Amino acid sequence: MRNLRPSDLAQEHGISTQAVRNYEQDGCLPPADRTPAGYRVYTELHAAALRTYLTLISAFGHATASRIMRALHDDRLDTALTEIDRAHARLLEDRETLASVRRAVDHLTSESSFSTVDSEAAYTIGELAGHLRLTPATLRAWEAAGILLPVRDSATGYRMYTSTDRRDAHLAAILRRGFYRLEHIAVVIAQIRGAGSTEGLIAALSGWEGKLTEQGLAMLDAGAVFHGYVGELGV
């Protein structure tokens, strides 16, 4: 197995040699041997690891890709596969929720009403955050951006969210996973609240659907590369 320098790995992907060293330090590449002078010596296995890691990033993002690679290098294949399963489950959940939102938009277009909500329902910030698997800090940030408009309880001063807020927060969570800016989401939510034009919402959902398709294809590509690297590792 031929030896490679950090610059050899870096040049293949147009990244810096420091990035290669950082990936190794973070456990995303296997540990490299050292020369007597202390220089790193990489091999074709390291090159395969780097290709795998960068492919995983495009499909799953930096955080998940890093967890997958570290698990592999710790000989924890099932943990790595669980990370991949979770990502596929999130993708499926997004697809199903988008389908539900599209049906709601069709209702809005035909009936001038997004959906029937329970005007009597009220949720605390903790309850709403728990339902959506978000943090209260995220909901406060969305309030500051104009996405959510909670009222304050007259007795306690605590934020209280209605079913309409819950609907808007659910849609905001979908769009955030599509990397839309808060300002853009606020415009979409405002359109829904006003039961006016839905063009912005339809365009946003179509764009996110396209991104889901791209992500799904990237996951398929990443799965093939991942499987090849697992074979090279002999995990």
Image: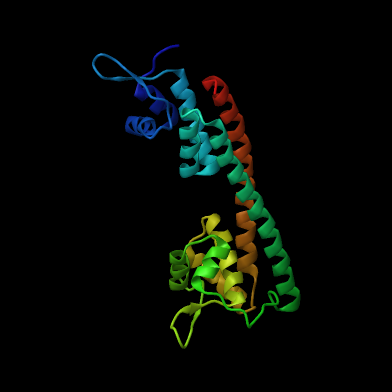
- Horizontal side, residue 184 vs residue 90: left or right: left
Q: Could you tell me how many numbered marks the image carries?
A: 0
Residue 103, by quadrant, is bottom right
Q: Which residue lies furthest to the right in this view?
A: 110
Residue 165, by quadrant, is bottom right
- Residue drawn at point x = 59 percent, y = 45 percent: 86
Q: Position of residue 124 (x, y in %)?
A: 52, 74
- Horizontal side, residue 232 vs residue 114: left or right: left
Q: Position of residue 109 (x, y in %)?
A: 72, 73
- Residue drawn at point x = 61 percent, y = 74 percent: 192
Q: Position of residue 68 (x, y in %)?
A: 51, 36
Q: Which residue lies furthest to the top in this view?
A: 1
Q: Which residue lies furthest to the front in this view?
A: 156
Q: Which residue lies furthest to the bottom in this view?
A: 154
Quadrant, the C terminus: top right
Judging from the image, the colouring scheme is rainbow
Q: Where is residue 218 in the image (x, y as percent from the top left)?
A: 59, 39
Q: Nearer the viewer, residue 123 or 206?
A: 123
- Residue drawn at point x = 58 percent, y = 59 percent: 174
Q: Nearer the viewer, residue 164 or 44?
A: 164
- Residue drawn at point x = 70 percent, y = 74 percent: 115
- Horizontal side, residue 16 vs residue 215: left or right: left
Q: Nearer the viewer, residue 164 or 14?
A: 164
Picture layout, residue 133 above or below residue 106: above
Quadrant, the N terminus: top left
Picture layout, residue 225 above or below residue 172: above
